[in-house]
Image (tube, grey):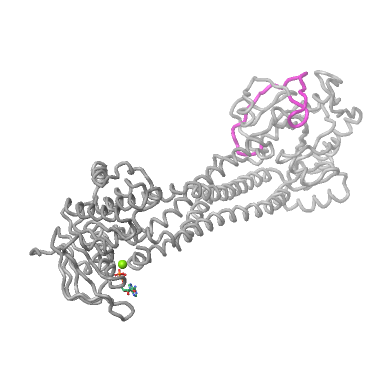
Amino acid sequence: MIAIKLIWANLAARPLTAALYVVILALGVAAAVALLLFSSQSERRLERDARYIDAVVGSKASSPLQLVLAGVFHADNPPPNIPFAAIAEIAADPRVKRVIPIALGDSVRGFRIVGAPPEIIALYEGRFAAGGPYAASFEAVIGADVARAAGLGVGDSFSGAHGLGGGHEHGDRPYVVVGVLAQTGAVVDRLVLTPVESVWDVHGVAHDHEQTPGEQAGGSSGHHHGHRDGHAQRSEDVEAAQTQSGGAQSVIFGPRGRQSAPPQEVTLLLVDLVSPMGAEGLLRDLNGASPFLAARPAAEAMRLYRLMGVGGQVLQAFAFILIGAAAASVFVTLFSALRERRGEIALLRAMGATRGTVFSVLMGQGVVIAALGAALGLLGGHGLIEILARSSEQAAAFGLSGALFHPGEILIALGSVAAGALAALPASIGAYRTNIARTLSETG
Amino acid sequence: MSEKPLIHVKDLVVSADGQTILSMPEWRLGAGEAALLLGPSGSGKTTLLHVIAGLIRPSAGTVTVAGVDVHALRPGQADRFRGRAIGFVFQTIRLIRALTVEQNLALALNLAGKPADKSRISATLDRLGVAELAAAKPPRLSVGEAQRCAIARAVVAQPRLILADEPTSALDDGNAERAFSLLRDEARACGAGLLIATHDGRLKALLANRLELAAR
Ligand SMILES: Nc1ncnc2c1ncn2[C@@H]1O[C@H](COP(=O)(O)OP(=O)(O)O)[C@@H](O)[C@H]1O
Ligand SMILES: [Mg+2]
C-alpha cells in the first residue's frame, strides 16, 4: 500500500517523462502485436483459401502470383481473359479431375462479382444461411460479409459496377439475391457468386441466350468477342474430354441444364487434380508449350507469405527496438536519479520503510510504466489491425480482424513488463543496498 | 532519571574500519526528557543517533529504546520499530519531494502502522504554523518552512523518541531558535523523549541536559 502510493507519486511527479516512456513502449508493443496478428491471421487465411484449389490456369500475359491473387484470394485485378476453349483443353488432361471456369471484372460495394458455375459453392464448402444456389442469369449467391456489409438478403436486388470499386454502375440489369451463405472465415464470405452468363450479359458478350438472343446491351468494357461460330465444335471437345477420362472427370462450364449456352471467354480456371502429385508435372507441361499459364495457390501463397515475411521482419526488429529503447530510457532515468534520490531513500528508511519497500518502489515504477505501455500497445495493435481491415479491401481479403486474440500477445505483453522490470532492477538493487547511516551522514 | 529509561546505552563500542569511533560506558535518557548531544564535528554524534535508531550495529554493548533491545530485532522488525517509536529530523533531507507536505505526514503515519488521519495531520500542521502549506510540494518551500514541515512529519505519529541531527545548522538565528522551541514543545506535547545532536553553539544555552562527546 505504502509502496503503491510512492510509485504513483514518483511517476506523477514527472508525468511527461512517464507518459513518454509509456508511449514509446506502447508503440513498440502495438507494432509487434499488429505484426503478430497480421501474420497469423493472413497466414491462416492464405493457407485456408489456397487449400481449396489445386491449380489456377489463366492467360500467359499474367503472372502466377496475379493468377492466384485474382482467382483464389480475390485481392488483385483480374488477368486478361482466356478463350472458352481452354476449359476443354485443360479438362482433357488425365491428371485433371474438375475444371471450374470463373469470370471476373465487376464488383458491388467493393465486393467482387464472380461468374462461375454453382459448383464453386461446394468448392468453397459454402453452406446456405438462406435461400439456395442460382439457376439462371442475374441470380446471385452472396457471402456472409457481403450480406452484412451491403445489407442484402434473399429477394433483394443490386447492380454491379465495372471494375473493383469506383467503377460506373451497370444500372441496366440488376442481380437478384437467391442465396446467402453462412460465414466460413474464408474468401467466399466476401464474394458475390453468379452464373458466368450474368457477367457476359453485363458486358454485352454475345452468346446463345435463349431469353435475350444476341443481346449486346450496355457493353462498356469492350469484351465483345462474338465467337458465335464453332459452338458445336467446343461442345464436342468437352464431351470428348469427359469420355477420354473414363467418366472420372467432370467439366463444368455453366449452370446445369444450360448446355446450349456455350460461353465465350473466361478469366481463369480453377483446377482440381485427380492427385496432388500430378500438380508439378501438369504445371511444367502447361507452362512449357501451352498458351496458358498455370500456378499452384499453395506455392504462390507461400511465396507471398515469404515476401511479406521480409517486410515483417524489418518491422518486427523496429518494434523490438522501440520496446528496448523504452526499457533503456527507464533504466537510465531510474538509475541516474538514484544518486540524487539516495537521500530520500535514506529518509524513507529512517521513517521506518523496509529494504523491501524501497526496492519495490523503484521496481514498481519500471513495471507500472511497462504494464501501461503493454496494455496501451495491445489495444493499439488490435486497433491498428481493425483499422487496416476496414480501410483496405486488400487487407480485408486477408481476413484481418482486430477482435481476434493471439496467444503470442501474452508473450509480448509479459516480455515488455519483464523488460520494464529488468530496466528498473539495477536502480532497485541500488536502493535496496543503500547504506542509510552513511547516506544520512554524508547528506544529512 | 526515571526508573525505566527511554534510552539506555550500556558498554557501547562502535567501530568502523577497525577503528573505534565511539565508546560510551553508560548513558540514559528518561521518558519525556530532552537532551542536547554536543561535540565537535567528527566526535560521533550522528553515529550515536544511528546506533540508537538501529541503523548502525555496534561492535559491543547494548542499546535499548523503550525497553526494546534495538539490535536484537530482525531487520524488518527494526524498520517497523523505528517507524513506530522514533521520529527523525535532519539538517537537509526533510521531506519526500514527490509528495505534498500533507502526503508526507500521511506516509509517516502509515510507516508507523497508523491510519492517515486527516484531522490529526491538519492539527499537527496547525500547531507548527504551516497549515497553509499542506498541499505544497517540498521544493516550493523555504528552508525554514521545510524544517517546520519536517518537524511536523517527525512528530505526527506521536513517537516515543525524537532524534534530531543538526536540525538548526542550516537555519538563520530566528529560524534556528523557532525550530528548537518547536521540537521541544512537540516532544513535550506528545510526551516523547528528545535528543538533539548539534555542534550549533546557539542551542547550548537553551537546554540544561547535555551529553558532551569529546573530539577524537
Ligand atoms: N562508515 C564509516 N566508516 C568509517 N568511518 C566513519 C564511518 N561513519 C563515520 N565515520 C567516522 O566516525 C566519526 C564520527 O562521525 P559522525 O558520527 O558523523 O560525527 P559527527 O556527527 O559528530 O560529526 C568521524 O570521524 C567519521 O569520519
Ligand atoms: Mg553529524
Where residue B46 appears, as percent x and y from the top left, is 29, 67
Type of secondary structure dominating the magenta stretch: loop
Q: Quadrant of residue B50?
A: bottom left
Residue A335 location (% of width, % of height): 47, 61
Q: In this view, which residue lies farthest toward the bottom?
A: B18
**Magenta-span inclusion, residue A52:** no
Which span is picked out in magenta? A160-187
A256 or A158: which is nearer to us? A158
Name above or below for residue A94 compared with residue B171.
above
Above/below status of A246 relative to A313: above
Residue A8 seen from this side: no
Near-viewer residue (A92 or A19): A19
Residue occupying the point 70% across, 35% down: A120
Residue A272 lies in what quarter of the image?
top right
- Quadrant observed for ligand 2 in the rendered image: bottom left
Question: Quadrant of the rendered structure where residue A431 is?
Answer: bottom left
Position of A37 with respect to A166 (left or right) is left
Q: Residue furthest left?
A: B3
Taking depth in this image into account, of A129 and B193 the one nearest to the observer is: B193
In the drawing, does residue B117 fall left or right of residue A104? left
The residue sitting at 36% across, 46% down in the picture is: B100
Q: Is residue A22 above or below residue A436?
A: above
Asked if residue A187 shows in the view, the reply is yes
Residue A163 is a magenta residue: yes
